[in-house]
Image (cartoon, helix red, strand yellow):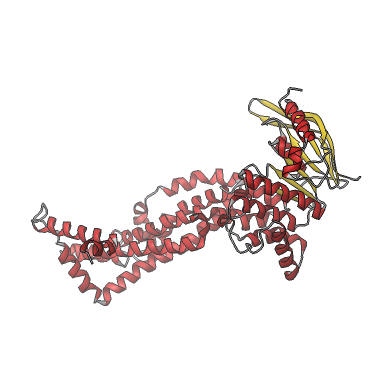
């Protein structure tokens, strides 16, 4: 077999990852960052391997996932029903849109001081921040989706004398599916980021706080190892959501 | 003959930014039971508006519409619709048979009867065995057959179609035209169709209502006295077919 053929069988993401690590290694050894405190790629990867052998790392991963996950679930459970209700009424949509847009653009960071006062640097604080960060955008997105239903479809249902509840269940909700899916994709990524920020800035438990501690302790190889770990988590979450999405709203692919 | 749909002095106005738009002016017409009636007229004349009034989706500004002797105030019982845009009127998240089942709920059929009703309707339109497919897995012509099957499954008295064959290719169009004629014969359904295609109107109809003017009035009602059963080749070669289509065409164009 030709070496070119072998190369073609390697998934592209492996090649780009190796290239990125190589560039990193060069930048940190012979390149512009050689004299800085930035660790080389190999140091960071080794630190990561070492840390994966420690229970504390897995605990931090679990705490972060818990924070992001619970916050995400709570936000979804609030945002989707609220979004559906808002979307069903033109009056509700117009009157809430301003308020929700207002809250949507407030960065969660600015309310960290308040949340620390209320919850302390805890899991609850992180969960609250995650919910706050994603619930408004997701609700608006859901409301948009519910309003996006094709009027032809609704009229067809009316001609066949289908009641309002059935119109909502069989037409409006599935129509909103693709909108909600986009919202959920963005929300899941944001949940992870905010869960890390909650630790990094607010001292909530998890990988964010580990980032802060290793940085303060001058263990920059471990800091970068955590960054790598977060990257991997992010990819897994995004893949998982994409997988679920293709199954739940299967009709949009064609 | 019994009158199935009676349109009495119907006017329709829409409020707009630049004043009230007067679309339909004093339309009166009776559709006989089991008849196939086409509504034709120039683009934008108000054909679809009249059709929407017939389905009870909106009330006329003045005048009355009676279906089976009852004045309608919403979509009447026993009405089925087939619209031009099948991709928008079938639900992509439900299989063909579930799309059909959805409209049957009011009839309280029971499981076995429901199954039977769905399968026989699919068979009637030549879609036997495709019930488990999703609409988007089927061709355009098959999707429109599926909407016809959905309409038939409700065992309607009246079938209302808005340019049902405008989005399919010419060959499929002929097939579907013959299909709706067969369906009309098999079930004795009263059919009202809006179309742009004058040949199609002549080929399918017992009567053609020509709308014209702004606001639209009934310009003429043309009786198509070509005997049934009709066939794509023989009927369309009939000299009387040519006369009728020329006559209707001239009226739609305002030449007569």
Which residue is situated farthest in the right direction here? B1
Residue drawn where x is 34% and y is 62% of the image:
A235
Above or below — where is A95 with respect to B127?
above
Q: Using residue B211 as the reference point, say whether residue B30 is left or right of it.
A: right
Q: Using residue B35 as the reference point, say whether residue A157 is left or right of it.
A: left
Viewer-nearest residue: A32 or B254:
B254
Number of numbered markers: 0
- The x and y percentages for residue A154 are 65, 49
Above or below — where is A30 with respect to A204?
above
- The x and y percentages for residue A100 are 48, 48
Residue drawn where x is 66% and y is 55% of the image:
B146
Residue drawn where x is 71% and y is 33% of the image:
B46
Above or below — where is B96 with respect to B34?
below
- The x and y percentages for residue A232 are 30, 64
Viewer-nearest residue: B113 or A235:
B113
Q: Quadrant of residue A66?
A: bottom left
Residue B216 visible to an observer of this rendering: no
Q: Quadrant of residue A243?
A: bottom left
Viewer-nearest residue: B1 or B225:
B225
Residue B127 visible to an observer of this rendering: yes
- The x and y percentages for residue A21 are 19, 60
Above or below — where is A149 with respect to A38?
above
Viewer-nearest residue: B186 or A233:
B186
In which quadrant is the N terminus of chain A drawn?
Answer: bottom left
């Amino acid at each position: 077999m030709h070496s070119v053929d072998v190369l073609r069988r390697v998934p592209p993401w492996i090649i780009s990852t190796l290239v990125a690590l190589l560039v990193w290694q060069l930048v940190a050894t012979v390149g512009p960052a050689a004299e800085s405190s930035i660790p080389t790629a190999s140091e960071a990867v080794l630190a990561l391997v070492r840390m994966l052998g420690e229970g504390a790392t897995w605990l931090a991963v679990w705490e972060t996932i818990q924070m992001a996950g619970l916050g995400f679930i709570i936000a979804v459970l609030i945002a989707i029903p609220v979004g559906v209700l808002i979307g069903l009424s033109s009056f509700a949509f117009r009157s809430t849109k301003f308020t929700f847009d207002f809250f949507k653009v407030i960065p969660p960071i600015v309310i960290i001081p308040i949340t620390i006062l209320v919850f302390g640097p805890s899991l609850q604080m992180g969960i609250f921040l995650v919910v706050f960060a994603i619930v408004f955008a997701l609700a608006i997105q859901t409301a948009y989706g519910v309003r996006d239903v094709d009027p032809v479809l609704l009229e067809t249902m009316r001609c066949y004398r289908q009641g309002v509840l059935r119109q909502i269940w069989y037409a409006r909700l599935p129509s909103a599916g693709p909108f909600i899916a986009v919202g959920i994709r963005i929300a899941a990524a944001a949940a992870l980021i905010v869960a890390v920020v909650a630790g990094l800035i607010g001292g909530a438990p998890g990988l964010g706080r580990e980032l802060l501690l290793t940085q303060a302790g001058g263990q920059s190889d471990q800091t970068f190892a955590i960054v790598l770990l977060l990257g991997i988590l992010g990819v897994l979450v995004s893949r998982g959501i994409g997988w679920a999405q293709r199954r739940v709203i299967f009709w949009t692919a064609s | 003959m019994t009158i199935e749909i009676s349109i009495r002095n119907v006017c329709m106005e829409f409020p707009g930014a630049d004043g009230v738009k007067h679309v339909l002016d004093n339309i009166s017409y009776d559709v006989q039971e089991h008849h196939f009636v086409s509504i034709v007229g120039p683009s934008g004349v108000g054909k679809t508006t009249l059709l929407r009034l017939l389905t009870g989706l909106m009330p006329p500004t003045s005048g009355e519409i009676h279906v089976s002797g009852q004045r309608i105030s919403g979509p009447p019982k026993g009405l089925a619709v087939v619209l031009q845009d099948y991709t928008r009127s079938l639900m992509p998240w439900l299989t063909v048979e579930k799309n059909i089942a959805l409209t049957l709920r009011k009839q309280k059929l029971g499981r076995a009867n429901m199954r039977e009703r769905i399968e026989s309707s699919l068979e009637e339109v030549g879609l036997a065995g495709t019930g488990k497919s999703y609409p988007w897995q089927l061709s355009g012509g098959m999707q429109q057959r599926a909407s016809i099957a959905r309409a038939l499954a409700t065992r309607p008295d009246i079938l209302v179609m808005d340019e049902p064959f405008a989005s399919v290719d010419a060959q499929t169009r002929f097939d579907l035209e013959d299909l709706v004629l067969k369906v009309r014969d098999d079930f004795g359904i009263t059919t009202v169709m809006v179309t742009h295609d004058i040949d199609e109107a002549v080929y399918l109809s017992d009567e053609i209502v020509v709308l014209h003017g702004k606001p639209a009035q009934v310009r003429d009602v043309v009786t198509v006295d070509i005997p049934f059963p009709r066939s794509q080749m023989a009927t369309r070669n009939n000299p009387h077919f040519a006369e009728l289509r020329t006559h209707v065409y001239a009226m739609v164009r305002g030449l007569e």
